Image (spheres, grey):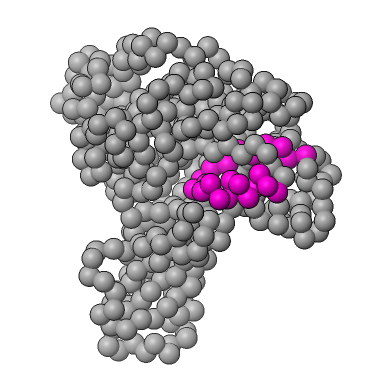
Amino acid sequence: MSLSMNLSDYLDALETRNPQSREQALMTRLPQLVAQAQTSPGWAEILHDVKAADIRSRSALAQLPVTRKSDLYGLQRRRLPFGGLNSTPAHQLQRIFMSPGPIFDPEGRGQDWWRFARPLHAAGLRSGHLIQNCFSYHFTPAAYMVEGAAAKLGCVIIPAGAGQTEMQVQAITELRPDAYVGTPSFLKIIIEKALELGADISSLQRAVVGAEALPPSLRHWLQQHGVPLVLQLYASADIGNIAYETATDGVLNPGMVLDEDLILEIVRPGTGDLVAEGEVGEVVISSFNPDYPLLRFGTGDMSAILPGISPCGRSNTRIKGWMGRADQTTKVKGMFVHPSQVAEILKRHPEISKARLVVTGEMANDAMSLHCELNDAASPQNEALKTALVASIRDITKLRGDVTFVASGSLANDGKVIDDVRKYE
């Protein structure tokens, strides 16, 4: 199948609706979403004085409180596993995931539950195509998001997961998948290994990437090294697909198109106040999910609305894509790292009086280092302490990191716990 074939097709008629018809349909469904949410104890508490029938416009929605991703840890500790935000009982779900934090995320039993078919279809993937799925299958949901979409589209999956780079290259050379789905940094690693081995991975004509930033320099590198179409999607473990890139005749279109089952708001970080169209703010989502309804859910991600309709013909709202975090939570190698995790490391090691996790490097080459000030009784030559701290970082964040002991008083008094100084360009 040629690269440009079917790229202008749409998954369904919803994608090309008149924008006013879409807005009317969403607002008609909104009171039902509120009523559904209020059947669960967590949302009943958050929306305790709200009349569902009154929430039928964006202005009414904007009066509801924002529940942020950063609130989930506390909510879930009070009501395991989902903070009482699920309208389907846990024992009736298909899967329960455990993301770093830990944060628990549900998956229901509906087809394409995470709504990943749209971004894969927009990349030209159709029935019979073979996908090398390199998202992790370990505790987190991204790989299963792809599985559900592939089942709907009729695609075949190689459940490759992450790691084992030589096996990844072997699978591509011998099975000849049409597309890669996973993080952009891991695709770069696979390509570099293939170049080292002299392996033919030219079957990969498409890549759908996510879970970390995709700077233009990395996209260009991937295209220059044999993957002509690289499209990015924006998703989360709480919501599933949020927005996705499209192409027309192989040429990238500006922005990301919003999924059809969401209401998007952009608010001033730390508030529920809407910003002007085009202004950068926090992405807030209301999701029409039958098992895990979300109302004004603050993702902690920053973006802005792009005016107009995409050249691909999909008429939904476009956003500029991921533009950083509204809080100090950051992603390293596709995994969230939270300030609370740094605090947990410090609790394990009372020898540390103050610490800051510094994330450095360029995309596809992330590195974490915990910069630690020691109390008066601890020695910076204590290799056993350093080894124990490295082990705690791995245990708590599920990522590798090193440790640097710094002089007392050298860490800035600015409240920053995680300092992301990576270069994205």
Residue 399 spot, x, y in % from top left = 51, 62
- Nearer the observer, 73 or 198: 198
* Residue 414 lies in quadrant: bottom left
What residue is shown at x 36% (from left), y 31% (from top)? 305
Q: Is residue 195 visible?
A: yes
Q: Is residue 93 left or right of residue 294?
A: right
The location of residue 86, given as percent across then percent down, is 37, 32
Q: Position of residue 334 (x, y in %)?
A: 51, 51
The answer to whether 261 appears left or right of 13 in the picture is: left
209 in the magenta segment: yes
Which residue is situated farthest in the left direction here? Answer: 49
Q: Nearer the viewer, residue 46 or 84?
A: 46
Q: How many numbered marks appear? A: 0
- Is residue 214 part of the magenta span, yes or no? yes
- Quarter of the picture containing the N terminus is top right
Who's the residue at 53% across and 42% down the image?
210
Is residue 360 positioned above or below 304 on the image? below
Residue drawn at (64%, 47%) of the image? 222
- Measuring from the top left, give residue 363's x and y in whole percent: 53, 56
- At 42% from the left edge and 78% from the top edge, which residue is drawn? 404
Magenta extent: 203-225
Indicate whether 103 appears above or below 20: below
Q: Is residue 79 visible?
A: no
Q: Quadrant of residue 344?
A: bottom left
Q: Nearer the viewer, residue 305 or 260?
A: 305
